[in-house]
Amino acid sequence: MHFSDPLPLRSGASIRAYDLAYETYGTLNAERSNAVLVLHALNASHHLAGLYAGQEKSDGWWDNMIGPGKPLDTDRFFVIGVNNLGSCFGSTGPMHVNPDTGRIYGSDFPVVTVEDWVDAQARLLDALQIETLAAVMGGSLGGMQALSWTLQYPQRVRNALVIASAPNLTAENIAFNEVARRAIVTDPDFRGGHFYAQDGRAETKPKRGLRIARMIGHITYLSDDVMNEKFGRELRNALLREGAAPEGSDRVPAGDYRYTTQDVEFQIESYLRYQGDKFAEYFDANTYLLITRALDYFDPARAFDGNLSRALARATANFLLVSFTTDWRFSPGRSREIVKALLDNRRDVSYAEIDAPHGHDAFLLDDPRYTNLVRSRFERIASELESGADHE
């Protein structure tokens, strides 16, 4: 959908003539009351579920959660996925042309925040003539957006599902993001963010930096237990005993074994390099910088002297929060901060802490305790809609 009216941004800048890519699933009811907005995390998109016709390996990123008969049942709800402004999957972003200059934005794309994304999403809902959402739902950065919806547009949100998220990032999280960003901006092919083909210059994609950024991210998304279980200290091939090195190998003796400083030896190394290589092929470097900055900036309590209870006093939605015990990137303690702040304001809030070994990635995986919880919540929401129950 194209928008011609300028969107004011929290930075003081604005962006005009922009597009938002979105997908919908299910059918909007006659009352236009069964819409659920699902918000994506860092490297995801508006493609939530299903496969694109004729395209293998095009599964939606939350396909196990959304669809006919699934926890978020598209036979009962009208589900909307939106690609955030500044992303690289269809919505206007750094790789698009700035209508004010006629040149590709590159690193000149304006800084965007979670609040800016929510404002843009609200404009999309206005265009779709949806005044009130049955629910907003998201995990990780998507959970931050869901929380922000309840604060920016409290009258438009009946329910919020905030999963594996936090009210702001810890200093450690910001540090991980900064290391990943430095890997990108110090890649010689980054060219100050203007690496796209333009003015007779060929495109030079900073793949090395993107690979390292993704490898750092994956380390933080997994738990130590999962990495040990999946990879342990396993080598890609059996350790080569003295004299067993292949002809022409650069391996050097080290005790009873021969090692190398260049080859991929351990399975975990192979996994990380595979993930990094794959990511560098499809993701945009400037988008990575923008989105991690939006993560860093999100802090609704900042305007209230750090008092989260005061910040969340504006929310009127019913809440479900879910965290996972081995998620050290968005630990359960961060979700409990939100729960306490909501309870301080006597809001309707349910909280589940799932004992799962998968780290931050758990919110994307199948766990019956988790998926049944989400299913139960949406069944309750659907029953309320069908009975015409009023939302206070």
Image (cartoon, rainbow, N blue to C red):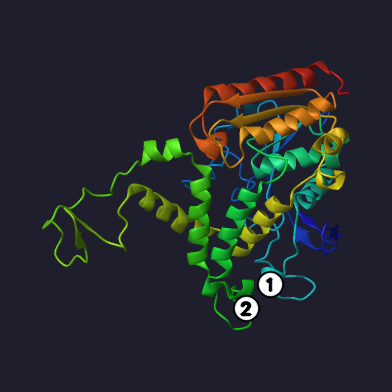
Q: Residue furthest top?
A: 387
Which residue position is annotated with label 1? 104
Q: Residue furthest bottom?
A: 200
Give, as a three-letter code, the residue at label 2.
Gln
User: In what element is the residue under mark 1?
Assistant: loop
Please tell me in which quadrant of the rendered image residue 388 appears.
top right
From this view, report whether residue 2 is shown above or below residue 118. below
Residue 180 location in percent, x, y? 56, 59
Residue 135 location in percent, x, y? 75, 31
Please tell me in which quadrant of the rendered image residue 300 appears.
top right
At 34% from the left edge and 48% from the top edge, which residue is drawn?
267
Q: Nearer the viewer, residue 340 or 181?
A: 340
Q: Nearer the viewer, residue 81 or 146?
A: 146
Residue 281 location in percent, x, y? 49, 60
Q: Nearer the viewer, residue 320 or 94?
A: 320
Task: Tell me if I can see residue 79 in this picture.
Answer: yes
Whichever of labels 2 and 1 marks the residue nearer the N terminus, that label is: 1
At 85% from the left edge and 42% from the top edge, which residue is drawn?
152
Residue 97 location in percent, x, y? 71, 70
Give, as a three-letter code, the residue at label 1.
Ile
> Marks 1 and 2: in contact by CB < 8 Å?
yes
Q: Is 88 on the left or on the right of 59, as rendered?
A: right
Q: Is 348 on the left or on the right of 236, as rendered?
A: right
Which residue position is annotated with label 2? 198
Q: Nearer the viewer, residue 1 or 168?
A: 168
Task: Tell me if I can see residue 29 in this picture.
Answer: no
User: In what element is the residue under mark 2?
Assistant: loop
- What's the distance in space between the residues labelled 2 and 1, CA to CA? 8 Å
Q: For the residue carrying disc 2, how many other residues have a C-alpha within 10 Å: few (<14), some (14-19), or many (20+)?
A: few
From this view, report whether residue 78 is shown above or below residue 290. above
